[in-house]
Image (cartoon, rainbow, N blue to C red):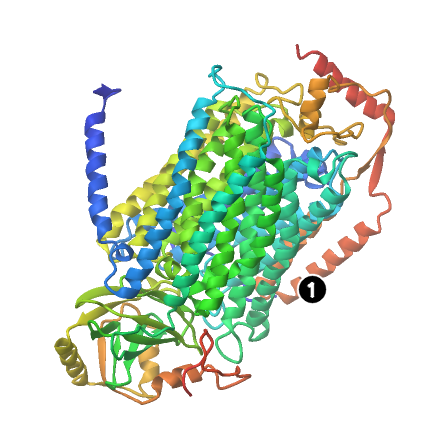
């Protein structure tokens, strides 16, 4: 009846594990109680959970990302605390708990923090920037969101029922195979990634089609915003790269569930095939995450330098070049697997070549600041902090790209410092810059600047304190993922790193306070025009938050910075002669139902509850068929209704003086 | 020089002392303090590439901070060119500078990757001593086929003589890592990888597994001893006195999961034991085409 699931699955084996479970369950209960108290369930269901509006889906993605950022950070600070005190078998974590933590930290930060944050920002902004009313496939978009949420929920549930994987976020076999890891941990990891990975593939396809087919008249490819360009390249990568990890995890699942031998030690299996498949996804994934962040930096630097972006064409070609090259470098993740010098040298050189377009981008941002009028908005600070810090990470990346140098530093904390040096200042600072930049667009009021700056400084200083010691420890030969160690000279560095994590904690606390203060003071920072930062591109031409249809009349574009141009010409905020009725996709519970049962499906497979697997698969199938054969998937907003909403908008605009 | 109760002079003094101590400590950092020609060449590569990149990294950091300050909104005396966004000359410059640096580093990379290929025997240093390495849960077994002995968690060899390692795993993927002598390479079951190393002087170094392999991973380190020829002979003689023997019967108990295993000597080994460890993962199912070239996946002599 319950497969492998018994009462033993509860984490009562250690106080820390039980505490983690209690916090998770308690947090979920608290949210439920607050929602009930606010009588917000119905509003949440009708206006949000069943929504297919790209803006709401984008916001829900970002909420998911921020929640998972907290969880991932708790993992991080627990690891830093353990290593700071772990000399000679010290430390506070029960055996093998550390191993679950580093596995869930990486899995969460990549798949359930960075991916949803990126997908959310693209969802929220890209359709506005290309002047369309929604993505090409609004329902598919909702399905993608709820599949991502299902994957995240599986990881969270592993805290409460059973254990999570100890195989690291990369899940290398044969360690992750059934012979060495018979528990449910690796299965949780596999199904969380498989389910959310399907969602990411569909998001990629959705965005590519949207950008290629739904641009406003006059918006040629070379008039698209840099963020849309990077979103396009990242989406192409998503559509092509994610199937590789889906296949890799699928084969690993077959090894584990069906006794097959794709990656086992014996019977013809070969772990090296997994490493290749994983990183054929894994390296493009790095660029899936960072390209949209590059796009955000481009927008932010131009807007807050009050200047046109320097070298737009260069930037576009550099983006496209990075996207293509990203598929040619995966082997640099395992130079130490014993490939011949020919192979290693080839992949080392391709890796270095990527540094060229990346370097070009850095120069372009610099030259955009040159002769500008720089406003140190938090988003701009994230961007400046990014440039200064990111070049250091790029430099250590090139060092690791030299195979013989990689032999010295692979798998050490130097490597850990390197990729955090790319992902935190590169990816996360970019997303946070975008979050603070576009927040008023989503909600109609600005985020508090002071707390934003406080958060930036804490993150930046905390980052340096946390990761510079890890670079040095790598030079001292400390391998990654050590629960304890016996070298006393490592400990001072690890203590500084732990201090860095505490400073980052202050940065996260500042973000939470910023949200509270900004909501409290929302009347003071209300954005009545829809254009709080003297924006340049189309998303600023509509109201904040935008109406469900985004643009009452689809704009016609004649410039790379169409809204700035319109403001100069005096054609901005011009009331159209008449309005036409607008078709809008109807809300549907199908997305959230599909995601919910995908979660049940994953959970049932993890615990071998086969009848439940069949039931949830049938429900999912019926949901898809039912929604796909629904002929009333759209409704019409009459011209009168549109006019009423637009009149309200112009009344607000009129009162801004 | 007090500000809000903080003694800045004292704080700066403390910080400088900490930095100085850190710098002295780093001089002995394993990667920066190589004890053999392979690790030395790898480290020099690191330094060379680092210096070449500083040509561009340092100016970029300085320019970023300088531009941010110089063109701050409140500095109205700075020039403002809101529509200046193109320059063919600058485009050519920003593409060619990184390209030139990458070409220079690419040449360095290509040559060094061949020179420091871990499968390539060390030249001009005399005949190598052969050691077979088996990664186990959670320890390292070193088999000396010429001497007929085996040791757990200690790798000894004569200083100045090349050591040629054949490496496999009898468990999950491990990575054999001796930062001061050779860097690292993966150890994988049913397969063999190679690594060459040489220690210039007698000395004692640390070796580790750097690829997470389960519960005992943190304790899976071993001692690397570079000895004078006389000491090495004595070391072999001592191992020959050990009571334990390693053969098909005793091997499974030795290989069974164990943590923080003390150094253990085996006075005799069954010939071909290492090959059997590899072969046991290959006896069933499809076997790969075998050639004696380079690359992972090439099994040992059968």
Question: Which of the pair A49/A548 is nearer the observer?
Answer: A548
The image shows residue A133 at horizontal and vertical percentages of 76, 35
Q: Quadrant of residue B228?
A: bottom left
Label 1 element class: helix
Label 1 marks a residue whose chain is A
The image shows residue B73 at horizontal and vertical percentages of 50, 19
Q: Residue at x 46, y 45 (%)?
A: A422
Q: Name the image quarter holding the C terminus of chain A.
A: top right
Q: Is residue A498 left or right of residue A244?
A: left
Q: Residue at x 25, y 74 (%)?
A: B125
Please determine whether, in this image, residue A260 is positioned above or below residue A413: below
Q: Quadrant of residue A503?
A: top left
Please determine whether, in this image, residue B39 is positioned above or below residue A307: below
Q: Residues within 10 Å of mark 1 (few under 14, many from 20)?
A: some
- Residue sticking out furthest to the top: A657
Residue A448 appears in view: yes
Question: Which of the pair A501/A14 is nearer the observer?
Answer: A501
The residue where tag 1 is placed is A614
Question: Which of the pair A564/A471 is nearer the observer?
Answer: A564
């Amino acid at each position: 009846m319950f497969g492998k699931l018994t009462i033993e699955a509860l984490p009562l084996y250690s106080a820390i594990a039980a505490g983690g479970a209690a916090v998770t369950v308690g947090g979920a209960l608290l949210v439920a109680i607050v929602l009930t108290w606010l009588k917000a369930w119905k509003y949440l269901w009708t206006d949000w959970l069943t929504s297919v509006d790209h803006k709401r889906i984008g916001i829900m993605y970002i909420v998911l990302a921020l929640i998972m950022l907290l969880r991932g950070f708790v993992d991080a600070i627990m690891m830093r605390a353990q290593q700071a005190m772990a000399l000679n078998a010290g430390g506070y974590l029960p055996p093998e708990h550390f191993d679950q933590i580093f596995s869930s930290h990486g899995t969460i930060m990549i798949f359930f923090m960075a991916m949803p944050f990126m997908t959310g920002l693209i969802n929220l902004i890209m359709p506005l920037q290309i002047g369309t009313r929604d993505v090409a496939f609004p329902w598919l978009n909702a399905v993608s969101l709820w599949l991502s949420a299902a994957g995240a929920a599986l990881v969270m549930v592993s805290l409460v029922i059973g254990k999570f994987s100890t195989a690291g976020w990369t899940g290398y076999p044969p360690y992750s195979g059934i012979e060495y890891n018979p528990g449910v941990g690796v299965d949780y990891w596999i199904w969380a990634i498989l389910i959310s990975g399907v969602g990411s593939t569909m998001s990629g396809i959705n965005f590519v089609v949207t950008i290629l087919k739904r641009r406003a008249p006059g918006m040629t490819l070379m008039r698209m915003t840099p963020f849309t360009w990077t979103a396009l390249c990242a989406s192409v990568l998503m559509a092509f790269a994610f199937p590789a990890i889906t296949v890799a995890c699928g084969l690993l699942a077959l090894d584990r569930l069906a006794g097959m031998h794709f990656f086992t030690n014996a019977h013809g299996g070969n772990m090296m095939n997994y490493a290749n498949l994983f990183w054929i996804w894994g390296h493009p994934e790095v660029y899936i995450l960072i390209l949209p962040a590059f796009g955000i930096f481009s927008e932010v630097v131009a807007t807050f330098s009050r200047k046109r972006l320097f070298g737009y064409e260069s930037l576009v070609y550099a983006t496209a070049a990075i996207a293509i090259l990203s598929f040619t470098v995966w082997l640099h993740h395992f130079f130490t697997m014993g490939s011949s010098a020919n192979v290693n040298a080839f992949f080392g050189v391709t890796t270095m070549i990527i540094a060229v377009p990346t370097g070009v981008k850095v120069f372009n941002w610099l030259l955009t600041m040159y002769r500008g009028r720089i406003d140190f908005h938090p988003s701009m600070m994230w961007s400046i902090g990014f440039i200064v810090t990111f070049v250091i990470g790029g430099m250590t990346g090139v060092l690791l790209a030299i195979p013989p140098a990689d032999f010295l530093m692979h798998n050490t904390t130097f490597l850990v410092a390197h990729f955090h040096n790319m992902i935190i200042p590169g990816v996360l600072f970019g997303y946070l810059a975008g979050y603070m930049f576009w927040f008023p667009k989503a909600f109609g009021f600005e985020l508090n600047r002071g707390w934003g700056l406080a958060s930036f400084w804490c993150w930046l200083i905390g980052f340096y304190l946390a990761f510079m010691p890890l670079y040095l420890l790598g030079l001292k030969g400390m391998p990654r993922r050590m629960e304890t160690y016996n070298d006393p000279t490592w400990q001072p560095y690890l203590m500084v790193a732990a201090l860095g994590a505490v400073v980052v904690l202050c940065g996260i606390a500042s973000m939470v306070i910023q949200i509270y203060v900004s909501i409290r003071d929302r009347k003071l920072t209300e954005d009545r025009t829809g254009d709080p930062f003297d924006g340049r591109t189309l998303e600023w031409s509509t109201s904040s938050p935008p109406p469900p249809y985004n643009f009452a009349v689809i704009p016609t574009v004649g410039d790379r910075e169409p809204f700035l141009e319109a403001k100069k010409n005096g054609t901005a905020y011009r009331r159209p002669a008449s309005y036409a009725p607008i078709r809008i996709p109807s809300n549907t519970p199908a997305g959230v139902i599909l995601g919910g049962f995908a979660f049940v499906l994953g959970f049932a497979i993890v615990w071998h509850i086969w009848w439940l697997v069949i039931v949830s698969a049938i429900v999912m199938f019926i949901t898809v068929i039912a929604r796909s054969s629904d002929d009333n998937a759209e409704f019409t907003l009459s011209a009168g209704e549109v006019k009423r909403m637009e009149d309200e908008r112009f009344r607000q605009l009129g009162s801004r003086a | 020089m007090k500000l809000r109760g903080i003694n800045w002079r004292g704080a700066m003094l403390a910080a400088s002392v900490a930095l100085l101590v850190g710098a002295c400590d780093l001089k002995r950092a394993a990667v920066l303090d190589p004890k053999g020609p392979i690790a030395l060449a790898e480290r020099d590569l690191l330094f060379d590439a680092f210096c070449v990149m500083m040509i561009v990294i340092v100016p970029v950091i300085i320019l970023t901070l300088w531009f941010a300050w110089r063109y701050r909104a409140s500095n109205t005396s700075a020039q403002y060119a809101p529509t200046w966004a193109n320059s063919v000359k600058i485009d050519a410059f920003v593409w060619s500078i990184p390209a030139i640096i990458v070409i220079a580093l690419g040449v360095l990379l290509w040559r060094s990757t061949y020179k420091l290929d871990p499968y390539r025997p060390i030249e001009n240093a005399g005949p190598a001593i052969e050691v077979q390495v088996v990664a186990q849960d959670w320890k390292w077994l070193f088999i000396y086929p010429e001497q007929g002995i085996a040791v757990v968690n200690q790798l000894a060899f004569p200083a100045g003589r090349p050591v040629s390692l054949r490496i496999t795993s009898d468990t999950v993927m491990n990575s054999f890592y001796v930062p001061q002598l050779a860097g690292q390479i993966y150890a994988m079951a049913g397969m063999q990888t190679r690594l060459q190393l040489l220690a210039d002087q007698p000395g004692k170094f640390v070796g580790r597994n750097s690829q997470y392999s389960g519960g005992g991973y943190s304790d899976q380190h071993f001692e690397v001893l570079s000895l004078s020829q006389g000491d090495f002979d004595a070391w072999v003689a001592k191992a020959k006195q050990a009571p334990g023997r390693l053969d098909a019967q005793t091997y499974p108990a030795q290989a069974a999961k164990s943590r923080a295993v003390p150094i253990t000597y085996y006075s005799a080994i069954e010939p071909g034991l290492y090959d059997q460890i590899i072969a046991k993962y290959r006896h069933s199912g499809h076997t790969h085409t075998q050639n004696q070239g380079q690359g992972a996946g090439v099994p040992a002599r059968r």
